[in-house]
Image: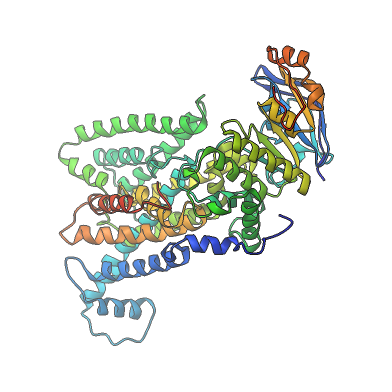
Amino acid sequence: MRAGVAPGIPALSERVRATTPRWRRPALVAAAGIAALAAALVTGLAFGSVSIPPSDTLAILAHRLLGWPVAVTWPASSETIVLELRLPRVLMAMLAGGGLAVAGATMQGVLRNPLADPYVLGTASGAALGASLAVLAPLPVGLLGLGFGQLLAFVGAVVAVALVWRLSRASRLGSLTGLLLTGYAVGSLLAAGLSMAMVLSGAQLRQIVFFLLGSLATATWQQVAVAAPLIIVGVLILAWRARSLDALMLGDETAAHLGLAVARERVILLAFAALVTAAAVATCGLIGFVGLVVPHMIRLVVGPAARPLLPLAAVFGAAFLAVADLLARLPGELPVGIVTAVIGAPFFLLILRRVRTGYEL
Amino acid sequence: MTELRLHDVAVAYGARTALADLELTVASAERVAVLGPNGAGKSSLLRCISGIVPVSRGMVTLDGVPLAELGREAIARRIAVVPQQVDLPFAIRVEEVVALGRIPHERSFRGPTAHDRQIVGEAIQRVGLDGFVGRDARELSLGERQLVLIAMAVAQQARLLLLDEPTVHLDLRHQVQVMDLMADLNDREGLTIVAVLHDLALAAHYFPRAVLLDGGRLVGDGPPAQVLAPDRVRATFGVDAAVWMGGARPGV
C-alpha cells in the first residue's frame, strides 16, 4: 500500500474499464434510459384510441407547458386529449413504475433476497383488502382527488407493513427470516380477507379484479399531484441511503463492522420503500413485475452497487410502465398488470439466457 | 497507533455468560492469536472488541478512549473485521466488494472519489487479486473469496484488523497465503492483528503471542510455545497433543 501502484501494472480504473464492455458503463446506461423515457412520453401522449401526430404532441407540450410561440395548427380536442387525459396518465405510469422499481430494488437489498418485490411485506394484500372493502361498503368519502377505494388501499398497505414490522420484532428467528415469514403470514391472512370480500362482492367482483390487475385509466392531475410528492421524496431518501443498502448486502454483522447503525438504517429503508409502494398501489392498483424485474435488469448491466442501481431503476421502471400502459390501452384498456407480465417475463428470460458471463443472478 | 485494552470485561447473552473477568492489552502493531475450544468465547471476544456486542461489565478502550463513546462509523475507521464468509445475494465483481470497505469513509450522496478508487486498487494489489478484477466474487473459490474479504478490510484503512478463523475452510496453500499476508501486513504496515484461530500449528508458526480462552476466561497469554504447553492443551482441549516448535513449520 505504501509503495503505491507498481510500475507496469495498470491502475484499477483502467483494469475495470478493460473488463467492462462500453455499454455497461452507468453514464451510457443512464443516457439510454433518459432517451427511452422521452420516447415513452411522446408515444404515450400521441397514441391511444385517437392518434395525434407526434409533431403535434410535441408542439402542444412546447406551446402550453413551455410557453414557446408555436403556431396553433391542431384542433382544441387534441390539446384536451394530450394535456388533460394522457399527460396525467403517462406521468402517473412513470411515477408508479419508477417508484415500484426503486422500492423493489430496496426490498431485495434489505432482505438480501433476489426474489423479493415491493409487495413482499404485505403491502399488496393490505392494499387489495382495503380497496375491496371500499367496493363492499362504498362511502362517498374522498380526499385530494382520491376516491374512497384509493384511500383505503393506501391505508391498508401502510397498516399491513406496520403490522408485519411490529409482529416480526417478537420473532425469535434471525431478523430477516422472521421478517419475511411474518410478511408471508400476515399477507396470507389479509389475502383470506380479500377472498372473502370477493365472494361477498357479487356483481362488483369486476371492480376488485381490476384493482388486482392494476390500471392507470383513472389517473387525473389531482392524483398525480398527491402521489408525486410521496413517490419522489421517498425515492430521493432511498437514493440518499444508497450506502446503507450497499452495506446491508453483506449481512447485519458485516454492515455494522462497516460503520452502519443496522437497525435504524433498515427501518428507514423499509419504511420509505413501503411508503412509495403504498402511494403507487393506491393510485394504480397492483401492478406486478416492474418491481421484481427492473432492478435485476439494471443489476445485470451495471452491477449491484446501489448508487447507480436506484436512479437507473427509477428511470427504466418509469419508461417500462409508461410503455406497458400504452400497449395496454391500444387494444382498448387491458389491465396493465397483464401487459407488464407479458412483455416483462419473456424479456427477462431472454436476458437470463443471454447473460453468461460477468453478472449473473 | 492503536492500543487496545480490555479491563475487567464480561459479556453475557441473556443469562448465559460468554466472557468473564477478562484483562487484555494489545499494543500497537502486535500480532495476537486467540485460541481455545469451541464455545470458549473466542468469537464473543472479537465481537466485544469490535463493539457489536456490548460488554455487560468492564470497559474496552482504544487508545484510551472507551469504545462506547465512539460512534459506529468512528469504530469502523479504526477497526476492520474480516468475516469468515459472506453470502452475497447478488452477483458482484471482486472490485465492487473491495470498494464496500470504503463505506465508513464515504459521505451519503457523493459516490466514491478518485482517492477511494485508488485505495481500492491498492488493496486489491496488496492482497494479490490483480488477476481477479472483473470476476464475479461468487464464482471464486473459498480461499480466493477470503482474500477478497481481506482486501475489503485493507481498503477500510483501519489500524486494527480482527479476523475470525480466516483459514477455517481453506486448503493448505490458501491457509499459508492468508497467514503470510497477515504477517506481512503486520510487519510492513504495522497493522495490529488479532485473529481467532482453530489451527494451533498455524498459530504457533505465525504468531509471536497467543491468548488461550476456556469457558469464557483467559487461561493463557504469552508466546505460543508457553501457552500451548502439553499440560495446558490437555486441560483446555481435552486431548493429548504436543506442539513442537522446531523445524521450518511447527506441528501439533
Percent from the top left, x then y, of residue A219?
A: 29, 58
Residue B121 visible in image = yes
Question: Is residue A75 placed above or below A22 in the rendered structure?
Answer: below
Foreground residue among B135 and A219: B135
Residue shown at 35% from the left, 50% from the top: A293
Please determine whether, in this image, residue B219 is positioned above or below residue A229. above
Q: What x and y, as percent, mark residue B164?
A: 65, 33
* Image quadrant in which you'd find residue B108: bottom right
Which residue reaches farthest front? B247
Q: Residue at x 22, y 77 (%)?
A: A53
Above or below for A72 versus B227: below
| Residue B22 shows in the view | no
Residue A98, image x, y percentages? 39, 56
A264 left or right of B234?
left
List x then y, in percent, for residue B152. Answer: 62, 47
Q: Nearer the viewer, residue A14 or A282?
A: A14
* Image point (23%, 42%), residue name: A208
User: At 37% across and 40% down in the image, what residue appears?
Assistant: A156
B206 or A40: nearer the eye?
B206
**B1 shown above or below A175:** below
